[in-house]
Image (spheres, grey):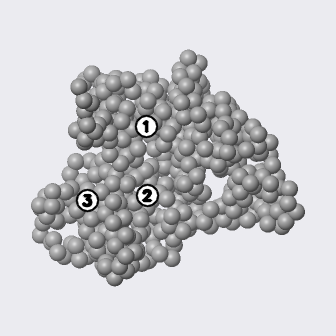
Amino acid sequence: MASTPVTRDTINPKVLECEYAVRGEIVILAQKLQEDLKNNPKSQPFDEILYCNIGNPQSLGQKPITFFREVLALCDHPALLDKSETHSLFSADSIKRASQILSQIPGQATGAYSHSQGVKGLRDTIAAGIEARDGFPADPNDIFLTDGASPAVHMMMQLLIRSEKDGILCPIPQYPLYSASIALHGGTLVPYYLDEATGWGLEISELKKQLETAKSKGICVRALVVINPGNPTGQVLAENNQKQIVDFCKTEGLVLLADEVYQENVYVPDKKFYSFKKVARSMGYGEKDITLVSFQSVSKGYYGECGKRGGYMEITGFSPEVREQIYKLASVNLCSNISGQILASLVMSPPKAGDQCYESYSAEKNAILSSLAKRAQQLEHALNGLEGVSCNRAEGAMYLFPRIELPKKAVEAAKGAKTAPDTFYARRLLNATGIVVVPGSGFGQAAGTLHFRCTILPQEDRIPAIISRLTKFHEAFMKEFRD
């Protein structure tokens, strides 16, 4: 018999089920419009596409941190270390760090494979950075360097999900990496709803309710995903709330999957980032008490090195037998890219007070973070000034997730166009202004509510123009569809 042809009906149904809204329908339309603008600059009522759909800072003009890039350049081209002019082009700190890193890499070659968990010397540096951050010991053997945090999340889903009867508790709204990876690996997403009325609060009563509901359906819940600071919601959890979450996971025997990639992105003075590992250890819980996986990435923070694909997970509380299986999964991919590994070590061990380049590094870091805070506040204020729009405080991360109340006529028009109302709004916004946002339905939202996610990443001098375009569009939209 001839083999079945490859059609949409014959590919893996899990691939069809998987969705990833931040690069979905609206972004595909934006790319088409961008191509139209390139071929005919007068073809649209705007002169550029403004991608506010994804946390991709350097694509919107953020400059990389000089120290990080100098070290990377020297590691990738070590012959520069032997040239006299290098000392006038690169800082002494960068030269010293690059030499140090190269001495840890077998063959001193960034083009060679490393250990499957990542270069041991770089994991030592990261462990020391975690220890300095948390005040509790970290073991380099607990660290797996990955191509950004996403492959680490996939690895955990692959490990934990055996069938559709295995469930993962996920926040709603959530970053769609989680829903996509759960679908791809054949598990069940067990939603718990963040409370928008209390600034996207995480209520333990809600976790318990959803856990019991899942159990009543025969689902074995394996893990709890917590995103802190939140994506797409931008909230920062209070330490006491984190303690409740740790206790919940310990009591219920759940793996705590802590997405902490925005740990540097906190913009309000009354909130502070605490890692879940620090919280658990401060409560007296050790390896035998709770199983915890922490994810970190070089794509976010103040560094925004998305294209370098660097990140890691720190795994604690797994038995030696399970760790062997996690190592096996890592080894299937051979290793993560070396540039990303180097960056992960730099992010967790940046220049310190007393280093020659500390002041210039600090100035770059602080300028980026203070500007992000300012942009968040400006956009939050502008959104709250729009008719039918309410936006919670931007405490952290890189996004705002405003709620929109659309007139009934707009909802009916969306039905006529066979699309969700928030997608209808986002598409109209793009066609009128060139601004790309992601409909809230791509992240999940409480029934009867509509949202969109917008990044705070366009450069500071562009924010007034974005606010002006958005305001003008929204006023015209509401006037057109007013009941």
Residue at far top of view: 321
Which residue lies under the disc numbered 1? 225
Which residue lies under the disc numbered 2? 54
Q: Earlier in the sequence, mark 3 or mark 2?
A: 2
Question: How far from the left and from the top, in percent, is residue 261?
Answer: 53, 47
Quadrant containing the C terminus in the rendered view: bottom left
- Is the residue marked by circle 3 packed among few (<14), some (14-19), or many (20+) residues within 10 Å? many
Label 3 sits on what residue type? Thr
Quadrant containing the N terminus in the rendered view: top left
Between the residue at mark 1 and the residue at mark 3, the CA separation in whole angstroms equals 26 Å
| Residue 127, placed above or below residue 247 | below
Q: Quadrant of residue 177?
A: top left
Q: Earlier in the sequence, mark 1 or mark 2?
A: 2
Which residue lies under the disc numbered 3? 423
Residue at far bottom of view: 42
Question: How far from the left and from the top, in percent, is residue 337?
Answer: 61, 44
Q: Earlier in the sequence, mark 1 or mark 3?
A: 1
Q: Residue at left 25%, top 42%?
A: 8
Q: Is residue 170 visible?
A: no
- As rendered, which of 461 and 88 lies closer to the eye? 88
Q: Residue at left 21%, top 56%?
A: 420
Q: Quadrant of residue 254?
A: top left
Label 1 sits on what residue type? Val
Task: Answer with left or right where residue 15 lies relative to residue 352.
Answer: left
**In the drawing, what numbered circle is on residue 70?**
none
Q: Is residue 335 visible?
A: yes
